[in-house]
Amino acid sequence: MGIGTVIGVVPIVHESHFDYKDYNQAVQEGLANSQVDRKKLVEKLDEGVKYCNDLANNATESEKAKSNQYSEAVKSYGEFKTGIKFVTNVRDDSGFYDSSVDLLSHVKVESNILSTPPLKVHAFPMDVDSAPADFPREVEAKMKVCKSQYDREKIEVEKAAADYASTLNSETSYVDVKFPEKFDENNFHIAVAGSNKITTGSLDRARTPLDFTIVSKDFFSVYPKFRGDDPTVKVSFDGHALSFENKTKKFVQIKSVSIYYNDNIYSISRNDNESIVELSPEAVSSGYDLVDRVNNVIRAESNYPNMTADLAKKTNFKFGFAIKYRVEEQTVDKTLYRTDRYNLYNVLKNS
């Protein structure tokens, strides 16, 4: 076409059409001349095709047994998992446990994902290509081939169904129970023991035991309640904040506060000319946050990690305050000082 375009030749396109009318007439004339009974040939072919198709459909239908197995397995496995209930056995070795931890929130039941059944579509085609005289015999031969193929594949289908049933039985025979050997929550150190697998043969899955041991507890910023006074001022400590009471009819300036914790001392002050708190006559000033003002040494001293009641009963510490103050119109600072020894267990129990 490219050359024709260049030299000016007009291309000619030929189209052909299949004449079915002529074709069918030629077929009929050929059948008539050969004296072949076309109707019987078609009926024989239909018989063979139906026979092979029925076998193929039977084989394909047999595949559905695996789908039924899967549906039953999913149902029974779900019922098994739903029926699992844990019984928590809690042993408090810390002596401080208050049931504030949701223990079972750390336990997970993980079921298997069941294998979906592989399904095969079976087909036994009836391919016949022979002379009319041999046609019926070839159809019969091909039907026998279909039957042989069906018998082989039926055995394969049944074996596959048995293998799949075995796989499902294995996958639905247990669930995994996941939990940490140890975990921390609400300052408690907790150990867990129990079975990591529950089998479908468990006699009483509704009472599956799990053992939780409350090993110890961490305590932070442990300060005892405290009171100290003299004729001029009274100091109270609620475990976190200080309160000052002026017992006189004059102004009182609190110049500094020193906190004692065992052998450590930390002082809070401004300068000689300023007070940290000024008290009007017979006034009370409360809410002076002390815990948030202490230094890291005192803060560390007030922490008691991995504590048990038995250990706390054997642990004592010294705690107290020194308050430097000055009364109006006086030029000399005065001191209110007091420290005491405390038992850690009693402080924790009463806090």
Image (cartoon, helix red, strand yellow):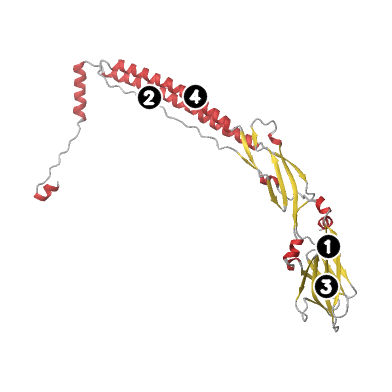
Question: How far apart are the alpha carbons under marks 3 and 1?
Answer: 17 Å
Instruction: Work out whether mark 2 precedes mark 1 in sequence or the reverse, and give the earlier one.
Output: 2
| Distance between the alpha carbons at the discs numbered 3 and 2 | 103 Å
Q: Earlier in the sequence, mark 4 or mark 2?
A: 2
Specify the quadrant of the image occupied by residue 342. bottom right
What is the C-alpha distance between the residues marked 2 and 1?
95 Å
Q: Amino acid at mark 2?
A: Phe
Residue position for label 3: 323
Mark nearer the viewer, 4 or 2: 4
Q: Nearer the viewer, residue 70 or 229?
A: 229
In percent of width and height, residue 279 lies at 82, 77
Which amino acid lies under the numbered mark 3 shown in the image of this protein? Ile
User: Residue visible at 17% across and 36% down?
Assistant: 16
Q: Decide which of 261, 50 is in the foreground and name it.
A: 261
Q: Which residue is mark 2?
A: 124
Q: Are marks 1 and 4 in contact (CB under 8 Å)?
A: no
Element under label 3? strand
Nearer to us: label 1 or label 4:
1
Q: Is residue 271 left or right of residue 52?
A: right
Residue 313 image point, x, y percent: 84, 53
Residue 135 sits in which quadrant?
top left
Query: Which is in the foreground here, disc 3 or disc 1?
Result: 1
Few, some or many residues within 10 Å of mark 4 (<14, 14–19, 20+): few
Instruction: Tell me: 222 left or right of 13.
Output: right
Q: Which residue is mark 1?
A: 318
Classify mark 3: residues with Cα within 10 Å, few (<14), some (14-19) or many (20+): many
Mark 1 crowd level (few <14, some 14–19, many ≥20, 10 Å Cα): some
Work out whether 142 lies above or below 116. Answer: above
Per the image, the residue denoted by label 4 is 159
Up the image or down, 249 lies above or below 127; here it is below
Q: Amino acid at mark 4?
A: Lys
Dot 1 amino acid type: Lys
